[in-house]
Amino acid sequence: MIQLHGPIVALLTPFDASGKIEWQAFKAYLSSLYSWGVRTVIANGTTGEFPSMTINERRQVVEFVRENFAGTIINNVSGTCVGDVRKLIAGTKDCADCILLLPPYYYSACRDEGLSRFFIDTLSGATLPAMLYHFPQHTGNHLGIDLVTKLFDQGLSIVGIKDSSGDIDNAQLYQSNFPECAVFLGNDAKVFEALQKGLSGSVTGAANPMPELLIAMQTEYRLSASKAQSMQHCLDVWNRFRNASGYFEIPLVKAAMGARIDSFPVHVRPPLTPVPVEELDRVRKAVCNCLNDFRLLN
């Protein structure tokens, strides 16, 4: 059985100006993440712009990540059609260690009966263990305790839950009701609090340019909680900048990666829009300020 450990980095998908996947930049990016200490990643996640990609592209991405990243790979296979999800799962089995699955989206506020049918139909017979992905702001559907209990009762191989609701109390409910399950919080403002509350760790997309900070926070927490809390304050420099920037998170993070990787592509696919060129230096300076504060602690 796979053992999931945090922090987990949700990968960006680099595109060129025409919208094609920029494989050379992708390879350099994966190499950089590994050199910075990242050992677990999510391919084709929200940060990777999966809703804007074809099924074939998503297969190519996870295959490429497998070839170029030596750590643990979680592949997001989310979709609204059971058949499409099963195709993505089939294409994942030799490339990833675990799959990640949202409830279906577009049809919101669905009954647990319908949601459980979706998960059972997609995950039954899957050869890889699964993480459930709770993101009600985007799906309009809540993964409640009763629903998750029913999925466990069906014998599905569920090893983790990624809770991106922002509600740490909800993540704690998962942890207390499903102690055999690794629970990760998707909220960079609450990385330290997640450790305090006994969660398995964090999943981050926004901290792609500075994953060392989250790695050090999780390591240091066992030795010095006060130092880990100081690291949260460093990360909050970036969190405050993001919240005040007025830009959507994915293009902002792509712009920020240029502070660490020369010529990292800033392009995004519609309906997202890139950060304006005249703003790039300001974004990257914010990353550098955050990293400088972090280095002063070490």
Image: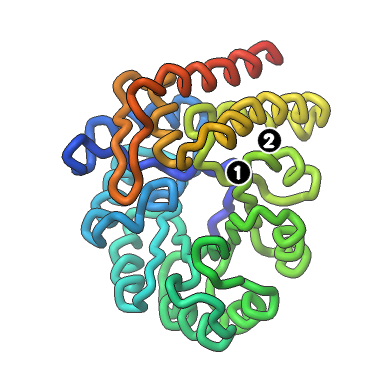
Q: Relative to residue 290, is residue 3 depicted above or below? A: below
Where's residue 101, x and y in %? 47, 65
Quarter placement of the N terminus:
bottom right
Q: Name the residue that disc number 1 marks.
A: 6
Q: The residue under label 2 is which amino acid type?
A: Gln
Mark 2 is surrounded, within 10 Å at the Cα level, by few (under 14), some (14 to 19) or many (20 or more) other residues, namely: many
Which residue sits furthest left?
18
**Is mark 1 in CB contact (under 8 Å) with mark 2?**
yes
Where disc 2 sits, the SS reads helix
Q: Tell me if 268 is positioned left or right of 174 in this view.
A: left
Q: Nearer the viewer, residue 133 or 176?
A: 133
Q: Nearer the viewer, residue 212 or 126?
A: 212
Q: Tell me if 298 is positioned left or right of 63 in this view.
A: right
Q: Relative to residue 33, is residue 159 depicted above or below? A: below
Q: Which residue: 66% across, 78% down? A: 149
Mark 1 is surrounded, within 10 Å at the Cα level, by few (under 14), some (14 to 19) or many (20 or more) other residues, namely: many
Q: The residue under label 1 is which amino acid type?
A: Gly
Where disc 1 sits, the SS reads loop
Where's residue 111, x and y in %? 57, 85
Q: Relative to residue 27, is residue 158 depicted above or below? A: below
Q: Name the residue that disc number 2 marks.
A: 218
Q: Looking at the image, tell me whether mark 1 or mark 2 is earlier in sequence order.
A: 1
